[in-house]
Amino acid sequence: GPYGEWGSRKYLMSSLNQSLKRMNLDYVDIFYSHRYDPVTPLEETLQALVDIVRQGKALYVGISKYPKEAAEFAYKYLEERDVHCLLYQGRYNLFNREPEEEGVLQQAKGNGTGFIAFSPLAQGLLTNRYLNGIPEDSRMAKGAFLKKEALTDETLQKIKALNEVAASRGQTLAEMSLAWLLKDDLVTSVIIGASSVAQLADNLKATENTDFSAEELEKIKKIIQK
Ligand SMILES: NC(=O)c1ccc[n+]([C@@H]2O[C@H](COP(=O)([O-])OP(=O)(O)OC[C@H]3O[C@@H](n4cnc5c(N)ncnc54)[C@H](OP(=O)(O)O)[C@@H]3O)[C@@H](O)[C@H]2O)c1
């Protein structure tokens, strides 16, 4: 729309209204501020979230891709207005551990906010998709979000080594990658992508075994740190 894509009250309110109309719904379960807007005063963005809940257009709110300091402000601002921040949405997977390294996971937990991981399979890298080349129908072949340059020799070696650990657990690499994220209470859930029903079925099996032995965790750590 004409109102940008950041965090102004005008943008948030109008984009939600348009979405509700398109989806033919009265309210959404969760509405995220995606993403932190360095230009709009944070109070304006957060007050819009509060008002959206008060209007009954969202049951819960969340934030996505907020720097740590802005997230802290958001958690407090919302809490003081009785609108608990339900979720923080961030990129987190075996190949990108920033939320862990930067303390975003702990910060969310400390504020009673869940963490939900997007791109939990690193857009398909953490699956069996690229073990033997780049399939024609893959996201990488289409090239929009996942570039061929991402599949370096080093990354391919890591994928193969991780795939072996997964096999020793009786899981596919996709299953193990999701299970690894869900292994403790720092991650509430994952937002999986799937381009087929078979992939979805595979991914759902991840929840059948989210326990890792210390030895497995050490093996995985060594592979991803290389
Ligand atoms: N907040 C944000 O900034 C942000 C940013 C990005 C995404 N998101 C959200 O997160 C969602 C998921 O992101 P994502 O699609 O990047 O997630 P992803 O789960 O990391 O990647 C999904 C891709 O992995 C492949 N795949 C999935 N399951 C597989 C399996 N079992 N075996 C083999 N390959 C498998 C598929 O690739 P092929 O298509 O090649 O089959 C699929 O398209 C998005 O839809 C969006 O809602 C949020």
Image: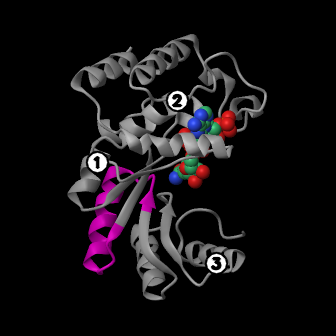
Specify the amino acid type for callout 3. Leu
Return the mark for residue 186.
Answer: 1
82 to 173, vertically: above or below: below
Of circles 2 and 3, the one toward us is 2
Can you tell me whether the CB of the residue at mark 2 lies under 8 Å from the nearest atom of ligand 1?
Answer: yes
Whichever of callouts 2 and 3 sits on the residue coming sooner in the sequence is: 3
Whichever of callouts 1 and 3 sits on the residue coming sooner in the sequence is: 3
Q: Furthest residue to the bottom?
A: 55
- Residue nearer the viewer, 40 or 148: 148
Specify the amino acid type for callout 2. Leu
Q: Residues within 10 Å of mark 1 (few under 14, many from 20)?
A: some
Specify the amino acid type for callout 1. Leu
Q: Quadrant of ligand 1?
A: top right
Q: Secondary structure at mark 3?
A: helix
User: Disc 3 designates what residue?
Assistant: 20
User: Disc 2 designates what residue?
Assistant: 126
Question: Which portion, as a residue range, is magenta?
Answer: 63-85
Q: Quadrant of the N terminus?
A: bottom right
x and y percentages locating residue 43 in the rendered image? 39, 73
- Residue nearer the viewer, 15 or 181: 181
